[in-house]
Image (spheres, rainbow, N blue to C red):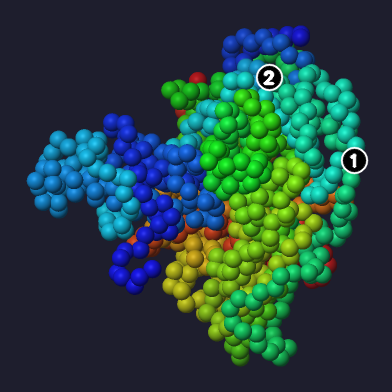
């Protein structure tokens, strides 16, 4: 890049600079807008519609939104990491601003009016407030959008916004409330067959004996069996028959080359004995502080499941040499690349289209189910194949979020404030998506499986296992020591928050203990080491919301705690206060949250995301941990893996700190989870007068903590 | 194949299927009422909730033969975009949902509750919905929406 003053394009627009990849005027009165971002329950399609409507000056309902389709939409990688608005939305905004500017240029020369006397109102070109008879559609033939964005067109200022910042209702919700065919799971294609996979119990397991006749005998109707290497699938016209056949099939397949798992690997501390790839980020190492001025504590978390409410689904049709795949994956382009490698065909011969699925919260079984369908479809040309995972498959074979151990270590000054801070992290991989190395279950079962994907994680920020490992507090020296454990007992990958959840829990628990040591109130202590004005604001705001009082006695059975983080140290700021009651177990009574996510496209949508993160955070904190046995994941239903139910959900109040609307939008979807878990931990410590450092905060751990007091 | 006759959303249905076929499969695949969702097949999550003669039942664990002669209500029979049930309207008003996969089951559990208790407390609503899992964390909005619908129905908005 030269050092010229050319405007910088948003990254996603730099990668996909042609404007007609984003905006087209194909139908009169309508605007076709494309986004590589996909709807995963977070409301992103509604927000993208608002962004485009705002910058193009058209009514939102004029917009036809195309999303996540390798034939139609720009390649924006994955819809993940709370980046859709912060990066994808900002790219779309700039593209729309440029399109609007090109049309105004064209209108100015055609109408002979000065450019700055023209504006757009709902798609019509207006001259000094008067209609000109021209609009986007009348001019479309004479404006070439097959050109690259320049970054030159100005975007609107927040004060000019009419659509952005409004609570536009979710465009996808009505269909779901009236029982429409809103999900991939509801889609049918003429001639479609249903399939289920008999899963390879582990990577590398091989079929020793396979009683095909017994599987056929047990089936209550006609089935076909697809087998290639260690990949086995059952196919039938009737879904009931195939589901029942799959449920019994595993007892008719004997597997060899199985590795016996150490039952201890269920608990996070197992990680401490494993070989690791070690990296230090931040300040250079220092000598240990003298004991009197040292703080050290270790926190752990078990593996966590995405636990989607609906098992993953994939549809595929191989016809005339072209493979069409329908998926609820978070990344249609990376999935296409991984399928091309798995099937050994040209990516140009594969189309992947996103259709909505149940909430995934990260990398769950969606990509694998799509691959299952694709592998079967390739062997049955002309026949559409639908694979819907069974519940035990979703729990047992999705990549889970890795167990983690985090040690927080600080050297303190005379006032009890950290002068030197270390967050030491032991964790399996948090990034293991298929685009990187063909990590798909079907690929592993086929002959000639790809090598295991390399364990690689980018540095913070944003990091993955290291995410939020650096406290935002103004400590003179801060470092992260990261032990990335490549070999874990089960497959792991990204789940909402990644490493941030336990890192924030460890840091914020430590902050409360340091405050106590210094004889200070937890809120006051945090503010004494927090210089970022936006961070201070959310902490002060949530304290006001909750009517925070310093000096309330500990050990009374009820307690309050605070947790704070800026997600990824670069997305939204969130501070959470939780109030709990603890007898033998923990009940969360009330939660308050204040967040700053800069320019907010749809405030109610942002609040909905923050609320969802709070509820999921409570569930993680109190209940969740994947169970393992000798072969793999043994918690394969909702009794084995309980999550928070309606009667356990507290009162929740969320407020957006509104003063930051002139700042760029910051991703909000993952901002509240870590602070919520931390706030609950601190509230429980306050209620009990003893701290629980291992998640989840189960009845057994509460009882053990009570015995210590 | 023996046939089972029952009523779905007020209209007669006759299905030739193995008597053990789960009602959920019959609704989704034979009758194409796909608003009712598969979640677990274990009667644990509530995404497949329907009303049978007014009672909430998880249709994944209910053999079709057991509903012969009975009235089944699914989400498609609750209301329409043109004539929404007060619960559906309240869910839209409160934007009570994220991914939405759990919503049809929750709406039917809520309808069963309001039919027998027109003025439930927040706690009673929560307990009535404990058979339904929402993984996105829309609980708070859903509880608010059910309260709102109950008030609406009490004021004469019921159908």
Kindly identify which chain the residue marked by label 1 belongs to. Answer: A
Q: CA distance from mark 1 to mark 2?
A: 37 Å
In percent of width and height, residue A415 lies at: 59, 88
Kindly identify which chain the residue marked by label 2 belongs to. Answer: B
Left or right of residue A224, residue A362 in this image:
left
Seen as rendered, the residue at the extreme left is A112
Left or right of residue A353, residue B102 in this image:
right
Residue nearest the viewer, comparing A650 with B1: B1
Left or right of residue A594, residue A397 in this image:
right
In percent of width and height, residue B29 lies at: 65, 21
In percent of width and height, residue A204 lies at: 81, 49
Give the crowd class for mark 1: few <14, some 14-19, many >=20 residues within 10 Å.
few
User: Residue A17, can we see it?
Assistant: yes
Residue nearest the viewer, comparing B133 with A483: A483
Task: Check the picture and name the quadrant holding the C terminus of chain A.
Answer: bottom right
Give the crowd class for mark 2: few <14, some 14-19, many >=20 residues within 10 Å.
many
Q: Which mark is residue A208?
A: 1
Q: Which residue is mark 2?
A: B26
Residue nearest the viewer, comparing A578 with A18: A18
Q: Is residue A223 above or below residue A680?
A: above
Task: Name the residue: 77% across, 24% down.
Answer: A224
Q: What element does badge 1 sit on?
A: strand
Of the two numbered discs 1 and 2 in the rendering, the one whose residue sits closer to the viewer: 1
């Amino acid at each position: 890049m030269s050092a010229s003053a050319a405007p910088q394009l948003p990254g996603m627009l730099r990668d996909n600079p042609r404007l007609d990849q984003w905006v087209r005027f194909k139908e009169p009165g309508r605007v076709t807008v494309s986004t590589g971002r996909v709807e995963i329950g977070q409301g992103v399609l509604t927000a993208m519609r608002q962004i485009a409507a705002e910058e193009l000056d058209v009514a939102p309902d004029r917009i036809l939104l195309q999303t996540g389709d390798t034939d139609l939409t720009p390649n924006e990688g994955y819809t993940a990491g709370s980046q859709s608005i912060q990066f994808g939305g900002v790219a779309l905004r700039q593209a729309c601003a440029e399109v609007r500017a090109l049309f105004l240029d064209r209108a100015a020369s055609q109408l002979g009016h000065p450019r700055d006397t023209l504006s757009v109102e709902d798609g019509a070109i207006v001259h000094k407030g008067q209609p000109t008879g021209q609009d986007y559609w009348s001019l479309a033939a004479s404006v070439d959008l097959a050109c690259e964005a320049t970054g030159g067109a100005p975007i609107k200022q927040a004060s000019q916004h009419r659509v952005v910042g409004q609570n536009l209702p979710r465009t996808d919700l009505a269909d779901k409330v009236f029982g429409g065919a809103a999900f991939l799971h509801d889609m049918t294609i003429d001639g479609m067959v249903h399939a289920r996979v008999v899963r390879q119990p582990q990577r590398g397991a091989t079929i020793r004996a396979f009683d095909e006749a017994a599987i056929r005998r047990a089936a209550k109707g006609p089935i076909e069996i697809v087998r290639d290497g260690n990949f086995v699938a059952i196919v039938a016209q009737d879904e009931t028959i195939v589901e029942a056949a799959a449920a019994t099939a595993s007892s008719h397949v004997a597997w060899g080359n199985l590795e016996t798992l150490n039952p201890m690997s269920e608990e996070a501390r197992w990680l401490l004995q494993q070989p690791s790839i070690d990296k230090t980020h931040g300040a250079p190492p220092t000598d240990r502080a003298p004991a009197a001025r040292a703080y050290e504590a270790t926190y752990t978390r078990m593996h966590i499941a995405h636990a989607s409410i609906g098992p993953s689904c994939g549809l595929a049709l191989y016809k005339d040499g072209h493979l069409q795949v329908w998926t609820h994956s978070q990344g249609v382009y990376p999935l296409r690349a991984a399928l091309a490698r798995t099937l050994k065909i040209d990516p140009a011969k594969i189309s992947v289209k996103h259709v909505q699925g149940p909430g995934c919260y990260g990398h769950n079984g969606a990509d694998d189910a799509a691959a299952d369908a694709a592998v079967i479809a390739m062997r049955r040309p002309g026949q559409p194949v639908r694979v819907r995972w069974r519940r035990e498959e979703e729990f047992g074979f999705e990549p889970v979020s890795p167990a983690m151990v985090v040690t927080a270590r600080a050297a303190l000054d005379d006032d009890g404030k950290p002068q030197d801070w270390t967050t030491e992290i032991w964790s399996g991989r948090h990034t293991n998506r298929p685009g990187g190395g063909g990590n798909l279950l079907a690929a592993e079962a086929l002959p000639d499986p790809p090598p295991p994907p390399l364990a690689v994680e980018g540095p913070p920020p944003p990091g993955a296992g290291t995410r939020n490992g650096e406290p935002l507090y103004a400590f003179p020296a801060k470092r992260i020591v990261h032990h990335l454990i490549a070999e874990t007992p089960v497959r792991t990958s990204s789940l909402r928050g990644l490493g941030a959840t336990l890192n924030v829990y460890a840091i914020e628990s430590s902050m409360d203990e340091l405050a106590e040591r210094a004889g200070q109130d937890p809120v006051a202590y945090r503010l004494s080491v927090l210089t970022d004005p936006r961070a201070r604001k959310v902490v002060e705001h949530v304290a006001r919301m909750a009517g925070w009082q310093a000096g309330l006695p500990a050990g009374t059975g009820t307690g309050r705690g605070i947790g704070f983080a800026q997600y990824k140290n670069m997305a939204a700021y969130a501070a959470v206060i939780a109030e709990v009651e603890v007898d033998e177990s923990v009940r969360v009574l009330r939660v308050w949250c204040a967040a700053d996510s800069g320019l907010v496209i749809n405030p109610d949508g942002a609040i909905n995301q923050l609320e969802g993160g709070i509820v999921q955070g409570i569930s993680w904190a109190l209940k969740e941990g994947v169970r393992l046995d000798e072969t793999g994941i043994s918690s394969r239903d909702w009794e084995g893996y309980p999550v928070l139910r309606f009667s356990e959900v507290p009162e929740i109040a969320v407020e957006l700190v509104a003063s930051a609307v002139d700042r760029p939008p910051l991703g909000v979807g993952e901002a509240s989870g870590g602070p919520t878990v931390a706030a609950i931990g601190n509230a429980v410590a306050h209620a009990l007068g003893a701290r629980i450092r291992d998640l989840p905060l189960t009845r057994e751990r509460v009882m053990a903590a009570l015995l210590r007091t | 194949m023996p046939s089972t006759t029952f009523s779905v959303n007020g209209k007669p249905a006759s299905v030739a299927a193995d008597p053990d076929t789960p009602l959920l499969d019959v609704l989704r695949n034979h009758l194409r009422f796909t608003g009712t969702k598969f979640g677990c097949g274990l009667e644990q999550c509530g995404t497949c909730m329907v009303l049978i003669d007014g009672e909430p039942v998880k249709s994944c664990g209910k053999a079709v033969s057991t509903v012969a002669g009975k009235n089944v209500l699914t989400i498609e029979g609750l209301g329409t975009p043109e004539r929404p049930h007060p619960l559906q309207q309240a869910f839209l008003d409160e934007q009570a949902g994220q991914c939405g996969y759990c919503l049809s089951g929750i709406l039917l559990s809520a309808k069963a509750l309001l039919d027998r208790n027109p003025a439930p407390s927040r706690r009673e609503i929560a307990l009535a919905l404990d058979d339904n899992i929402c993984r996105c964390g829309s609980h708070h909005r859903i509880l608010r929406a059910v309260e709102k619908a109950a008030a609406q129905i009490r004021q004469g908005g019921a159908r």
